[in-house]
């Protein structure tokens, strides 16, 4: 049997990893500023994380949600404390797409409506409804297509108001990334998020804050949406939540009253997943990683804005987009193969930096030195 060939692969095999560095099969060392799509939040093979998972695996690795799992309660309490949403409720799943899927379903159960507002440039996942609210027709199969999704221009308050005025009583939810990742590191404005909150309140629609990539402390705030000063009804999270272990969740406002069977999952919230997620929050809190993400991110953004060759630097904290001219389209590839630095990209020419939240200034300077050589 062959693998189903859907991933364009770099000819690199990672065999060892530690914090912000990885090594390939030839013992070549790399600086990892991408963390496998923003997944590595507290560093590769973080000792506390490894210990937490190992200890739990030696006790019990899995049982289903048909029994009490105290680790879930501990995780909910810790997440409420660190995120500042102590009165919210937690439902645990396995991936970002699944988190968004359940958030949209929850909203529809809540108000009995079908229509969802999403935005140009959005990426919310690849499962049925999550991909339907993703602005990429190429990955939306015919079976995923629905007339219930309304795409509006990102950060356009007038279009949002007009749509609510015309169809507000049919709109179940508005889903938005605080900072678009795949869309090119584009931040939702404070006033736009405030407008979403006000219109959802007025029309009893549900404000879903997709924090899968832009959440979990990456921007210096727990959810990047917190910058707006208003709360969403539901926050979705995944990526950095488990530092590589598949775990995701939705944080749900107290106005939603659950009923048995409303949502469900086999693997979501299993013992190992909870141990991984608790380890991440414990390290984030112990090492003050949100502050580090803000400080190192501010440093990187300020230094990158000094390069005349750069079209624009966008983002917040350690979620940074570097837009380059077409003439420098080679830089991402050269960073990897000439300077051994992993970064991400967004089409057409945006380099994405999504490193671990405990990235050091020395590592930031290592990247800046290599970047400077390539854009001369």
Image: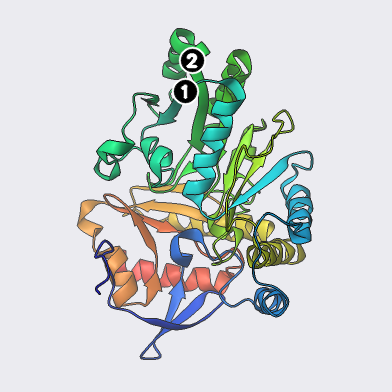
Question: Which mark is drawn over residue 34?
Answer: none
The N terminus, quarter of image: bottom left
The C terminus, quarter of image: bottom left
Where is mark 2, residue-wise? 170
Position of 80 with respect to 9 (left or right) is: right
Q: Residue at x 40, y 31 (%)?
A: 119
| Depth order, front residue of 370/250 | 250
| Depth order, front residue of 372/179 | 179
Regarding mark 2 in the picture, which secondary structure is present there? helix
Rendered view: 118 above or below 314: above
Where is mark 1, residue-wise? 114
x, y (%) of residue 166? 44, 8
Residue 230 visible to an observer of this rendering? yes
Callout 2 touching callout 1 (CB < 8 Å)? yes
Position of 86 with respect to 100 (left or right) is: right
Residue 188 visible to an observer of this rendering? no
| Depth order, front residue of 288/243 | 243
Mark found first going from the N terminus, 2 or 1:
1
Q: Residue at x 63, y 18 (%)?
A: 201
Q: Residue at x 57, y 68 (%)?
A: 359
x, y (%) of residue 373? 33, 71
Give the quarter of the image for residue 218: bottom right
| Depth order, front residue of 337/11 | 11
The residue carrying pointer 2 sits among few (fewer than 14), some (14 to 19) or many (20 or more) residues within 10 Å by Cα, namely some
């Amino acid at each position: 049997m062959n693998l189903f060939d859907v991933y364009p692969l770099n000819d690199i095999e990672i065999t060892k990893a530690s914090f912000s560095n990885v090594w390939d099969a030839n013992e070549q060392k790399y600086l990892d500023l991408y963390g496998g799509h923003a997944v590595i939040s507290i560093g590769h093979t973080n000792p506390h994380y490894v210990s937490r998972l190992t200890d739990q695996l030696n006790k019990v690795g899995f049982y289903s949600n048909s029994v009490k799992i105290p680790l879930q309660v501990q995780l909910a309490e810790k997440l409420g404390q660190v995120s500042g949403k102590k009165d919210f409720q937690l439902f645990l799943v396995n991936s970002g797409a699944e988190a968004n899927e359940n958030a949209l379903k929850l909203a529809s159960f809540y108000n009995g409506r079908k229509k969802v507002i999403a935005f140009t440039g959005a990426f919310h996942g690849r499962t049925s409804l999550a991909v339907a609210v993703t602005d990429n027709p190429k990955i939306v199969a015919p079976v995923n297509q629905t007339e219930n999704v309304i795409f509006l221009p990102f950060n356009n308050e007038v279009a949002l108001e007009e749509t609510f005025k015309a169809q507000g009583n049919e709109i179940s939810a508005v889903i938005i990334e605080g900072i678009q990742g795949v869309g090119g590191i584009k931040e939702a404005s404070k006033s736009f998020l405030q407008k979403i909150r006000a219109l959802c309140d007025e029309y009893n629609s549900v404000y879903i804050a997709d924090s899968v990539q832009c959440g979990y402390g990456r921007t210096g705030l727990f959810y990047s949406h917190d910058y707006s000063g208003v709360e969403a009804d539901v926050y979705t999270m995944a990526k950095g939540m488990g530092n590589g272990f598949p775990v995701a969740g939705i944080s749900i406002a107290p106005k939603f009253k659950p009923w048995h069977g409303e949502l469900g999952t086999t693997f979501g919230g299993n013992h190992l997943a909870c141990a991984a997620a608790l380890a991440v929050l414990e390290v984030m809190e112990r090492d003050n990683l949100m502050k580090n993400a803000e400080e190192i991110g501010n440093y990187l953004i300020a230094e990158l804005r000094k390069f005349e060759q750069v079209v624009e630097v966008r983002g917040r904290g350690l979620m940074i987009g570097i837009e380059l001219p077409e003439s420098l389209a080679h830089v991402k590839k050269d960073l990897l193969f000439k300077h051994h630095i992993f970064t991400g990209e967004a089409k057409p020419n945006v380099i994405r930096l999504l490193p671990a939240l405990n990235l050091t200034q020395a590592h930031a300077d290592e990247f800046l030195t290599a970047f400077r050589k390539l854009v001369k």
